[in-house]
Amino acid sequence: MASLDGFIADDNDDVGPLFDWYFNGSRPLTDGADHGPFAVSEASAAYVRPMWQSIRAIIQGRRLFDQTNGWEATPPAGEHLLVVSHRPKPEGWHPEAEVPFFDDIAAAVEEGKRRAGDGVLAICAGDMGGQALAAGLVDVVAIDVVPVVFGSGRRYFGSVAGQHLLEDPDVVVQGDRVLHLKYRVRR
């Protein structure tokens, strides 16, 4: 998710209304048992459900890991969670969970692809997602744009350096209070 001006949170890491569209419809995304009672518009459900079902592994950065407590080792989509961080896994955090920590985005992507098999490896937005884009490790950018302007905060691609071209969107879906877009990265 991102605001119209490209932020995933404000300066205080508050996501404000970015996730409101997850709860403003009548179509459930999940059974509600693991990650809440997501209920979206019919258009958003038709886009998000198959996308979530295709995901087999997710890579997240340490900031998101700390904010979500690593989704308690059960990501909202997929079976595998991998974390990119220069700090080790918190001592005692879900010792039963096979959630590896990497200090290198390329190594995390390599392992994530292995774990994803023929499914999708999703890389979360933020500094770590921007590093993956800059390193040429991203093939597709999927973004859910919400009609809000933050003005400042945490950028969708973090502090990614350089220019990166994307193809025209091959998916454009208008939901309720969200626009779903998907772009291939131009090589």
Image (cartoon, rainbow, N blue to C red):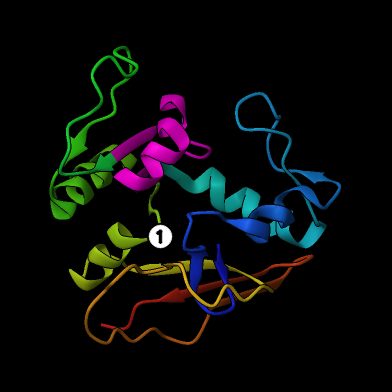
Horizontally, residue 51 falls left or right of residue 118, namely right
The residue positioned 13% from the left and 48% from the top of the image is: 107
**Residue 61 visible in the current orientation:** no
> Where's residue 65, x and y in %?
37, 39
Per the image, is 64 magenta? Answer: yes
The residue positioned 49% from the left and 87% from the top of the image is: 168
- The mark tally for this picture is 1
| 47 is higher (above) or lower (below) than 89 | below
Residue interval drawn in magenta: 58-82
Q: Nearer the viewer, residue 14 or 64?
A: 14
The residue positioned 77% from the left and 62% from the top of the image is: 43
Question: Which quadrant, please, contains the N terminus?
Answer: bottom right
Q: Quadrant of residue 144?
A: bottom right
| 101 is higher (above) or lower (below) than 173 | above
Numbered disc 1: secondary structure: loop
Residue count near mark 1 (Cα–Cα under 10 Å), binned few <14, some 14–19, many ≥20: many
The residue positioned 28% from the left and 57% from the top of the image is: 128
> Where's residue 87, x and y in %?
17, 38
> Where's residue 75, x and y in %?
47, 35
Per the image, is 73 magenta? Answer: yes
Q: Quadrant of residue 103?
A: top left
Q: Nearer the viewer, residue 147 or 107?
A: 147
Q: Residue furthest right?
A: 26
Question: Which quadrant, please, contains the C terminus?
Answer: bottom left
Q: Which residue is mark 1?
A: 125
Instruction: Identify the amino acid type marked 1.
Output: Ala
**Residue 71 visible in the current orientation:** yes
